[in-house]
Amino acid sequence: MGDTSINTKQRWNSAHYTQLKISVAPELASAFKAACAADNVSMASTLSQFMTKYCKVADKSRPSAKYSSRRLRRAAMNTLIQIHGCLNNCGFS
């Protein structure tokens, strides 16, 4: 039996996309999920749009961060959570 369309789509997605996994406070996750549902948009597309806009406005001259330890990765995630307010500044409601 040949490949199913689901297998083909999964293979294409894994070749063309990178999956991200984040851990956030349950309150933030449920608020984000509710906001996306209320606006009838997917969480993935909202995060993709945010990342695109953030990368365009990020300071390109700063050195790239090294996330070799859990402490540094946690600090980077806390920074991302702190800039969560940037969603409003980037045109997201």
Image (cartoon, helix red, strand yellow):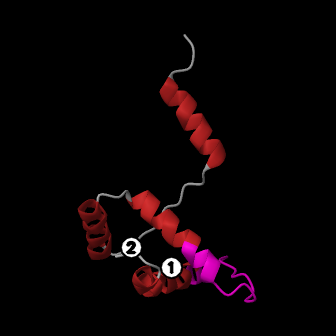
Would you name the residue on which mark 1 appears? 77
Task: Please give the name of the residue rendered at 49% of the width and 81% of the height, measured from the top-left corner.
Answer: 80
Q: Is residue 11 left or right of residue 90?
A: right
Camera-side residue of 31 and 68: 31
Is label 1 in a helix, a strand or a loop? helix
Q: Is residue 83 left or right of residue 76?
A: left
Task: Please give the name of the residue rendered at 57% of the width and 14% of the height, measured from the top-left corner.
Answer: 2
Whole-Å distance between the Cαs marked 1 and 2? 9 Å
> Do the residues bearing badges 1 and 2 touch, measured as CB atoms within 8 Å?
yes
Crowding near pointer 2: few (<14 within 10 Å), some, many (20+)?
Answer: few
Does residue 63 appear in this view?
Answer: yes
Would you name the residue on which mark 2 appears? 24
Residue 13 horizontal/vertical position (percent) = 58, 42
Q: Is residue 59 left or right of residue 31?
A: right
Does residue 69 appear in this view?
Answer: no
* Residue 59 falls within the magenta-colored stretch: yes
